[in-house]
Image (spheres, rainbow, N blue to C red):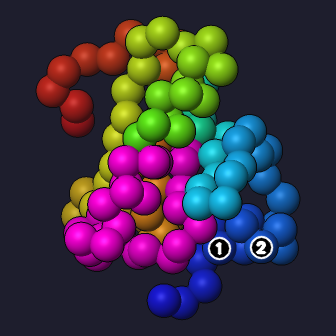
Amino acid sequence: MSETIFSKIIDREIPADIIYEDDLCLAFKDVNPQAPTHFLVIPKKPIPKLSDAEQGDKALLGHLLLVAGQVAGEQGLEDFRLNVNNGAGASQTVFHLHVHVLGGRPFSWPPG
Ligand code: AMP
């Protein structure tokens, strides 16, 4: 997979407001927040998009969701929304899998 802005954040080549890190993943504040709280959870493994994940990534994908919920709580969120854009047609712009976590305002359904 080619280098992305997120792999540069993992490698500390560019700065980010990192709020969680473990051996498998990283969470950092989105630079262009769409809600009062908006952070991203990314695997350190460079999976371009969700549909590229494989059976062997099952535990990693579960870990990303658990971390998203845990860090949301640490950020003071009780209600929050998770979003994963898969592919350019779904508004994915950075091709390194990431879970958006948004909170601090009401969310409508269905999403736009
Ligand atoms: P997506 O459209 O799902 O690919 O989301 C990519 C997200 O990455 C967007 O919400 C951007 O605001 C965010 N983003 C891009 N560059 C950075 C960066 N250097 N630090 C933090 N967030 C970023």
Could you say whether the residue bearing mark 1 is in a helix, strand or loop? helix
> Vertical placement of 46 versus 59: above or below?
below
The amino acid at mark 1 is: Ser
Q: Does any portion of residue 102 appear in the rendered image?
A: no
As drawn, the label of residue 51 is none
Residue that protrudes farthest toward the bottom in the picture: 2
**Is 56 in the magenta?**
yes
Give the residues drawn in magenta, as a range.
Answer: 40-64
Residue at position x 35%, y 41% from top?
83
Return the x and y of residue 61 as percentages of the image width and height.
37, 55
Residue for badge 2: 11
Return the x and y of residue 106 as percentages of the image width and height.
39, 10
Front residue of 88 and 74? 74
Q: Residues within 10 Å of mark 2 (few under 14, many from 20)?
A: few
The amino acid at mark 2 is: Asp
Residue at position x 37%, y 34% from top?
82
Could you say whether the residue bearing mark 2 is in a helix, strand or loop? loop
> Vertical placement of 7 versus 20: above or below?
below
Is the C-beta separation of discs 2 and 1 under 8 Å? yes
Return the x and y of residue 62 as percentages of the image width and height.
37, 48
Callout 1: CB less than 8 Å from ligand 1: no
Answer left or right for 75 relative to 52.
right
Residue for badge 1: 7
- Which image quarter: residue 56? bottom left
